[in-house]
Image (tube, helix red, strand yellow):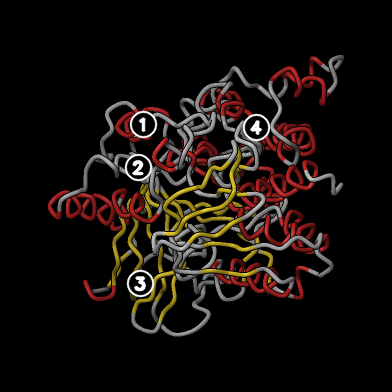
Amino acid sequence: MAGLAAAITLAAKGETITLVEKQSYPGGKMRIVEIEDAKIDAGPTVFTMKWVFEKLFADSGSDFENHVGLHKANTLARHAWDNSGYFDLFADEAESEASIREFFGPNCAEGFRKFSKDAKAIFETLQHTFIAAPRPNPIQLSQRVGLTKIGTLLNLRPFTTLWKALGDYFPDPRLQQLFGRYATYVGSSPFQSPATLMLIAHVEQAGVWHVKGGMHALAVAMRDRAQSLGVIFKSNSDVSNVIIENGRASGVKLATGETLHARKVLYCGDVSKLTKEFFTQSPAPAVPIVQPKDRALSAITWNAVAKTSGFPLQRHNVFFSDDYADEFNSIFQKSQVPVKPTVYICAQNRNDDANLISGNRDHLLCLINAPAFGDKRQLSQEELSQCHSATFSLLDRCGLKLETSASQMQVTQPANFETLFPGSGGSLYGRASHGWMASFSRPGSKTKLKGFYLAGGSIHPGAGVPMATLSGMLAAQQIMMDQGLT
């Protein structure tokens, strides 16, 4: 997504761009799997921050909504802990507050009102100073916010964990789980991430959209827009090396042996692949490699076509573990798949009233969090069977029944993600956002190697579809500045 965004931005300025893609499809992690006649999203499933894509297309001379069909969701997600009922969170803040009041009581409703206000304030403070701006250090961020606004900076709550902060708003631990889950949107633990990540709750309340044709349609639309601007798209082209000549990046060598020469090279994979071996005639540029202990979450996923019953699935559904602390302790401290995982299900042909849009079978992505150890080991069939049992036992406990078969299901584990995205260990988000300095530890778009730039989910401003897209736009802006085009 970062590469597509950068290609669109640069091509719109008249630059000649070749976009080299390892896979046969565009979009990187925004991929699909085909099961029978169903094309199912196997990567990101939540579309937010529409303004990022509106700006990307507008700056290229087009209207985003002419390229992508969108439907704004009324229900953000459905949540369950057992078979006693479910709780819905809505796009309308007042509706969510009323729902919380009914399900959790008046104290939690009051806490939600204050939480929503504070989450919005954090987002508004960081939107133009950090999220959509070149990577700052802490001092630069202070200057952007305003050195006289110490209270505003402290209200970002960088030194308080998200889990602890949520306890100040919500006396019911189930709501701590629900809003703590937003840390996993950036591959992290709510017990180690700063409370600043509250802003993700505001991002969702500001709008979640369903993309017509699935999330992968967004990547296809971006590729098509790039090609309409003259971008050359080379699919099935694996880059083996970055070529260094006279102390600067001067092109790439493909696995086939073909060489592509260029004035600038923008790399959009995981930064941890950028070891010395990836460069010719020069040591690797000064890019911080993410150590295994600092990696963000990986996952085990099951894409499936299934007949479901017993639980009224929405588009987005979360079934919570009854030992949330142990789930993240297992992953980040023990490097083990949790025995009691939380399960996310995206039922991709469901609409807001929880009815199937078409057919009588659901197209599902089921996901549990896992450690990013895919470069070290592959889970055995016995281990995968144990994960399957733990996952689907929780669903059964919450009342959801699935009828499917082995031929209607595709499993992806950390080792598979490592193969798809080399260097990551299967991490889907780059560096975990643990500790107040984590957000400043991601590299920016410019490196110390002349002519070599970075973008993607492991780069500033962070993981997630809109953030990766912003990183591509920021990298393009840096390239244009260095060429004197802005």
Which mark is drawn over residue 425? 2
10, above or below 426, in the image: below
Q: CA distance from mark 3 to mark 2?
A: 33 Å
Whether residue 437 sits left or right of residue 419 in the image: it is right
* Disc 3 residue crowd, few under 14, some 14–19, many 20+, Cα 10 Å: some
Which mark is drawn over residue 292? 1
Q: Are marks 4 and 3 in contact (CB under 8 Å)?
A: no
Residue at image mark 3? 308
Q: Under tag 2, what secondary structure? A: loop
Q: Under tag 4, what secondary structure? A: helix
77, above or below 220, in the image: above
Closest to the observer, 48 or 181: 48
Which numbered disc, 2 or 4, marks the residue that appears first in the sequence? 4
At label 3, the amino acid type is Thr
Q: CA distance from mark 1 to mark 4?
A: 37 Å
For marks 2 and 4, give the one nearer the viewer.
2
Closest to the observer, 458 or 89: 458
Which numbered disc, 1 or 2, marks the residue that appears first in the sequence? 1
Q: Residue at x 53, y 31 (%)?
A: 287
For marks 3 and 2, give the one nearer the viewer.
2
